[in-house]
Amino acid sequence: MGKINLFLLFTAVLSAVLFSNCRLNPIDDIKTDIDQEWALPIIDTEKSFGDIINGFDPKAFLQIGTDSTVILRYKGNFIAQSSLDIFANFRNVAFPVTDSIMSVPFSLPSGVYIDYVNVKKGTLRWGLAPPTEPLNVTIYIPQLTKNGVPFSRNFNHTSITLDTLEMAGWQLAAKNDSIFIHTIARKISNGQPVNLKNGAVYQIQNFEFAFAKGYFGQSVFDGPQDSIKIDFFDKWKNGSVRFDNPRMIVTLDNSFGVPVRSIMRQGEVVTLNGQRLTLQSPLTAGIDINYPSINEIGKTKRTVVVFDKTNSNIAEIMSSNPVGIQYDIDGLTNPDNNTGITGFMTDSSKFELQVEVEVPMIGKAQNFEVNDTFDINLAQATDVTQAEFKVVTDNGMPIDLSLQGYFATANGTVIDSMYTAKSPILRGASVNSSGLPINVVTTENFIKIDADKLKKIKYATKLIIRYAFSTTSSAAVPVRLTSTQKVRVRIGVKFGLKTQ
């Protein structure tokens, strides 16, 4: 199952914007004998959201919609069930001769009625015990035909007789759920009939079908329970987010020539706090699946079922901090039990299922906080007495971003923060009625790190970054993140060095 962490996506945007094309001469390369102050412009770069997402693995199901909107897709496992093994009880059977014309049950599940079967594989064997005198024997099976001609075998029986018929390519029809086998024996000397009861036996081995036509009753494709991991909230700490129109898409492919109804036995969203919220929709009660007609043997018919905000509660339950979706979808053949429907199946017929969750980057967020932690080493920054960064952003994306960093020890104890005052907010662009940006917002921020702070944080080995995302405060509609939206970042640094 492919997936992508949305937090990592935002972090990648920030990191790629702030630190790509960044070249700063190392402090060790600057030789000075007096206190000096240096000011350098180190970044002037522009990145579109499309530039960032193009670097992600395409297997992560990251997609750009026709309107450039970014869409995250999470896929469940591919589930396939092959032809119903309705002939399991007939695969290997043996039956003694009980009469010159005997009925052999064509053992099928209850409610299944077969018109005929094209045999793919199988061997019909027969054996006759030694007779008291020579016999002429005819074996005749009117329901086993090839090119319209019934199977018949005539031979003289004088001692033990063993023989076989390879059934591949033959057609077998059932009559009243039975196959009638004629075993006619006559004395060669005078033509008198002889009953071979208990003196002969038939055996069918390794029976397999290539094609079957008939009524197949009500059978269940028992699909296993499956789940999809939603990692959007993996690093969630606080705040809320609401997607405008998430969708759950169920794709069902059917090459059985019989009516099938899909039934959702389970459909639940599992939340971050362990709650289970049930997917509610009229569609969960059952969907009739397309199937090929008798004139479309070998073809596969597709049915796509979409759960969205118009026919289900998925928008509500996907806005409850979900970490996964669990589902169990079965298929029921001939759901209306209409015996007048004649269907078919081949040995390659399949019922296939794929579930996908689609999350367009359209929605609203309020102080949606996430954390990440990085290893740092500041112990060698002894020559720097103070530093100040000036960050100028031209933001064309409809997202306000506030951030704060915490310098911490290896066990997580916070020593100091990156910003002494309130975390700055990088303002996002305003949007129109479609949720698309209509301007570019320029923001300036300064980060001062003085000598006292440098002394404190030099013992830190971890940097905890906390990001808080909010959709543009002026947006009355859900905003859209598209591949063409851009952010320009200009960064300069001023730092002081102590004398040698």
Image: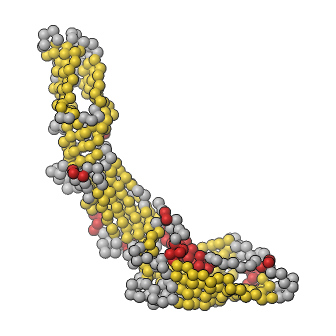
Tally of numbered discs: 0
- Above or below residue 272? Residue 145 is above
Left or right: where 311 falls relative to 239: left
User: Taking the image as drawn, is residue 92 in sight?
Assistant: no
Residue found at x 60% / y 90%: 444
On the image, the x and y values in percent for residue 231 come to: 49, 68
Q: Give the residue displayed 60% in from the left and 73% down from the top.
A: 372
Q: Is residue 329 visible?
A: yes
Q: Nearer the viewer, residue 299 or 90?
A: 299
- Vertical position of residue 288 compared to residue 492: above or below: above
Residue at image position (44%, 67%) is 73
- Judge by depth and name the residue closer to the eye, 411 or 19: 19
Quarter of the rendering occupied by the C terminus: bottom right
Looking at the image, residue 474 sits to the left or right of residue 339; the answer is: right
Residue 79 spot, x, y in % from top left:
39, 55
Residue at coordinates 45% horizontally, 88% vertically from top-left?
438
Q: Position of residue 242 (x, y in %)?
A: 43, 78
Q: Position of residue 416 (x, y in %)?
A: 69, 82
Picture quadrant where residue 383 is located: bottom right
Q: Quadrant of residue 394?
A: bottom right
Q: Give the colour scheme of this rendering.
A: secondary structure
